[in-house]
Image: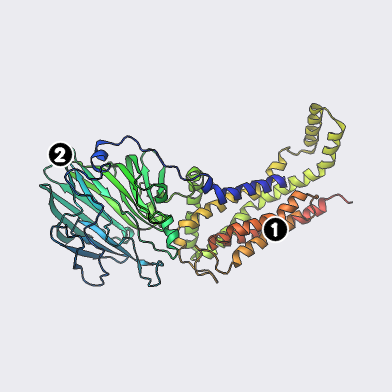
C-alpha cells in the first residue's frame, strides 16, 4: 500500500515538473481558408490597400484633466498628418481613442499598478505606437484599410449616463460610422460596446478586426510576462482554446474556423478580448506568428472576421483584469479565456480549478479575511473533510495487519495458484475485510492532490492574488523571498511521514520515500507561489493530530511481541 501510494505521488510530481516539456502545445493545422481570409488575411498586400501592420497614431501621453488633446502623428501617410486623441475618464479606467482609424489606443486601469519598471505608474495595455484595434472592410469588389483613415468625432452622453463616441468617415466611397459606448455602470467598468455601419455596400461585406499584436508587460519579470502572451478563442462547437505566441513560428498562419463566441489576447493577469453578440458570431480568426528578436515571442497578430448583417457590425470589448467574477458576468463562457491546466489536462483540471477559485472568493467575501488566511482555512477544511475517511481507512489497515500472519500461512500451505487464491479469499471473507482494502488506503492521501494541482494552475495567473500580502510575504502570488514556507512545508511533510511510520511493520521502501519525498517536494515548490506553499503547509499541519492518534491506535492494536 505504502509503495503504491508513494509511487502515485511521485508520478504526480513528474507530471507537474516535466509534462510541459513532454507535451508541448500542439499547433493546429491550417484549414481551408475562406474567400474572405484569402482576400484579406492570407495576402501580404491586399488589393487596393496598404499593409495594415503600421499604425497611424502614436500612444497618447498621460492625460489627467483635459478630455482631448491633439498630438502630431508619426505616420505621415495619414491624410491629415495629425491625430486627435479623445479621453473618456471613468472611476476605474481611462479610455483613449484616436480619430485616425477610429480605434482605442490606450486603456489605463486606475486600480492596478505596473511593476514592469521602477518608475511604476498604472497598467496600460497598449504598446506605444500601436492601436488596440484596427479595422479593414472587405466588400465584393475591394478591401479598405480603415487604420489610416481620418474620422470625424461626435461625442454625446446618453440618458443613462453612458459616454457615446461616434466616428464617421468615408472609405472607398463608402460612408462608415463606428460608435463606442462606454457604460456608466461600475459592473461594466472594463467594457466598451462597439457598433458600426457601412452605407452603400452591394453584396456581402465583412469586417476584419485586428487585435493587438502584443500587450504591455505589467510584471517585474517582464520576460516571464511575455512568455504568457497568448491568443484565446471560443468556438461554439468546442471548448475554449489558447495558443501561446511561442507556439506560432514567425510568419506561420493558423486559421481557426468559426462560429466563434469571442477572441482575445492575454498575458499573465490582463486580457483584451472582443465578444460577438448573441446570434452574430465571428466567422473565423487567422493567427500569424510575429518576427522574433530573441528566444521569447513578443508579437503575433490575430485577424477576426465578422460578416456584416444589414450593413452593420457589432461586438463588445473587454479590456481589463482576468477577474473571475467579471469574466463570468460577460457571459459566452468568457471566464474560460484563461483555461486552467495544460491542454491535455484542461478537461479535468479546469472544472476543479474553477470551483476552487469560486470557493476562495466566497470565503474571502463572506469572512472578510485576506486570501492568506483563506488559504490556511481551506487547507484545514480539506483535512477535516477527509478525517472520517482517514479513520475508516486506518481501521481497515489495522485489520490487514492482523491478517498478515494468516495470509502468509495460506501462501506457504498451498503452492497451487488456484488453491492459494481460494485460501486467501477465504481468510478475507472470514475476517470481513475487502481484498481491495490495501488500495483504498491510499485514497485519503490522494484525494487532496486534485486541489493541489488546481491551485498550482490557479496561482499562475489569478489576478485576485496579485500583490496580496500575508505576514512577512509582500505578495502571495510569487515565491517566498526568504524561502521560509517551502522549508516549513517540507519539514511538516517529513514529520507527517515519520509519525505515519511509527508502530507500522518495517517497510524499507516506505522509509526511504519518507525521507526523499519531502525533499523532492521542497525543491519543486521552492520557487513557486508562496500561497501554494502556504496552503500545502496548513494542510500538513492540520493532518498531524489525526496522524498521531492513528499511530497510537495502531500501537494498541499491534500484537504483543
- At x 11%, y 43%, the residue is 200
Q: Which disc number belongs to residue 496? A: 1
Viewer-nearest of labels 2 and 1? 2
Front residue of this view, candidates 518 and 498: 518
Please tell me whether mark 2 sits on a helix, a strand or a loop. Answer: loop
Residue at the spot x=19%, y=68% of the render?
69
Question: Is residue 208 rendered to the left or right of residue 549?
Answer: left
The quarter in which the N terminus is drawn is top right
Corner quadrant of residue 481? bottom right
Relative depth, front residue between 366 and 482: 482
**Vertical order, 218 against 434 (above or below):** below
**Residue 77 x, y percent position in the rendering:** 16, 57
Q: Give the residue pinned by disc 2.
A: 141
Q: Is residue 149 left or right of residue 276?
A: left
What's the colour scheme?
Answer: rainbow
Looking at this view, is 193 or 3 the one in front? 3
Q: Residue at left 27%, top 40%?
A: 37
**Residue 159, can we see it?**
no
Amino acid at each position: 500500500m505504502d509503495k503504491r501510494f508513494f509511487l502515485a505521488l511521485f508520478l504526480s510530481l513528474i507530471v507537474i515538473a516535466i509534462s510541459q516539456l513532454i507535451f508541448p502545445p500542439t499547433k493546429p493545422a491550417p484549414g481551408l481558408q475562406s474567400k474572405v481570409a484569402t482576400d484579406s488575411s492570407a495576402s501580404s498586400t491586399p488589393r487596393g490597400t496598404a499593409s495594415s501592420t503600421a499604425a497611424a497614431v502614436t500612444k497618447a501621453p498621460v492625460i489627467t484633466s483635459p478630455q482631448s488633446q491633439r498630438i502630431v502623428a508619426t505616420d505621415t501617410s495619414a491624410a491629415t498628418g495629425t491625430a486627435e486623441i479623445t479621453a473618456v475618464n471613468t472611476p476605474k479606467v481611462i479610455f483613449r481613442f484616436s480619430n485616425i482609424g477610429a480605434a482605442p489606443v490606450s486603456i489605463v486601469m486606475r486600480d492596478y499598478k505596473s511593476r514592469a519598471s521602477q518608475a511604476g505608474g498604472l497598467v496600460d495595455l497598449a504598446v506605444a505606437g500601436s492601436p488596440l484595434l484596427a479595422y479593414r472592410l472587405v466588400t465584393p469588389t475591394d478591401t479598405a484599410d480603415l487604420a489610416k483613415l481620418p474620422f470625424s468625432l461626435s461625442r454625446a452622453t446618453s440618458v443613462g449616463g453612458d459616454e457615446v463616441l461616434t466616428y464617421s468617415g468615408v472609405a472607398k466611397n463608402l460612408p462608415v460610422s463606428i460608435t463606442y459606448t462606454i457604460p456608466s455602470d461600475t459592473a461594466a467598468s472594463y467594457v466598451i460596446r462597439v457598433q458600426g455601419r457601412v452605407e452603400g455596400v452591394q453584396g456581402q461585406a465583412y469586417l476584419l478586426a485586428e487585435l493587438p499584436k502584443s500587450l504591455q508587460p505589467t510584471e517585474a519579470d517582464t520576460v516571464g510576462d511575455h512568455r504568457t502572451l497568448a491568443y484565446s478563442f471560443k468556438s461554439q462547437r468546442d471548448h475554449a482554446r489558447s495558443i501561446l505566441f511561442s507556439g506560432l513560428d514567425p510568419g506561420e498562419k493558423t486559421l481557426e474556423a468559426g462560429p466563434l463566441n469571442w477572441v482575445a489576447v492575454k498575458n499573465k493577469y490582463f486580457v483584451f478580448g472582443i465578444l460577438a453578440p448573441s446570434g452574430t458570431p465571428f466567422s473565423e480568426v487567422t493567427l500569424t506568428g510575429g518576427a522574433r528578436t530573441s528566444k521569447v515571442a513578443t508579437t503575433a497578430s490575430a485577424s477576426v472576421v465578422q460578416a456584416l448583417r444589414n450593413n452593420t457590425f457589432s461586438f463588445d470589448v473587454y479590456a481589463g483584469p482576468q477577474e473571475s467574477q467579471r469574466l463570468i458576468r460577460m457571459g459566452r463562457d468568457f471566464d474560460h479565456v484563461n483555461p486552467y491546466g495544460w491542454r491535455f489536462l484542461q478537461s479535468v483540471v479546469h472544472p476543479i480549478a474553477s470551483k476552487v477559485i469560486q470557493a476562495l472568493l466566497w470565503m474571502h467575501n463572506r469572512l472578510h479575511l485576506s486570501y492568506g488566511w483563506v488559504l490556511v482555512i481551506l487547507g484545514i477544511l480539506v483535512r477535516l473533510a477527509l478525517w472520517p475517511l482517514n479513520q475508516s481507512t486506518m481501521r481497515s489497515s489495522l485489520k490487514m495487519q492482523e491478517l498478515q500472519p494468516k495470509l502468509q500461512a495460506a501462501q506457504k500451505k498451498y503452492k497451487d495458484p488456484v488453491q492459494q487464491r481460494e485460501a486467501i479469499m477465504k481468510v478475507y471473507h472470514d475476517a470481513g475485510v475487502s481484498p481491495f482494502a490495501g488500495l483504498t488506503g491510499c485514497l485519503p492521501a490522494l484525494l487532496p492532490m486534485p486541489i493541489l494541482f488546481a491551485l498550482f494552475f490557479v496561482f499562475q495567473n489569478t489576478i485576485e492574488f496579485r500583490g496580496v500580502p500575508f505576514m512577512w510575504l509582500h505578495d502571495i502570488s510569487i515565491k517566498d523571498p526568504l524561502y521560509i514556507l517551502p522549508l516549513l512545508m517540507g519539514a511538516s511533510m517529513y514529520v507527517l511521514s515519520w509519525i505515519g511510520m511509527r508502530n507500522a511493520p518495517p517497510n524499507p521502501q516506505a522509509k526511504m520515500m519518507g525521507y526523499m519525498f519531502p525533499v523532492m517536494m521542497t525543491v519543486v515548490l521552492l520557487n513557486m507561489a508562496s500561497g501554494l506553499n502556504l496552503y500545502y503547509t496548513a494542510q500538513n499541519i492540520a493532518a498531524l493530530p489525526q496522524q498521531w492518534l492513528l499511530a497510537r491506535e495502531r500501537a494498541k492494536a499491534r500484537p504483543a511481541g
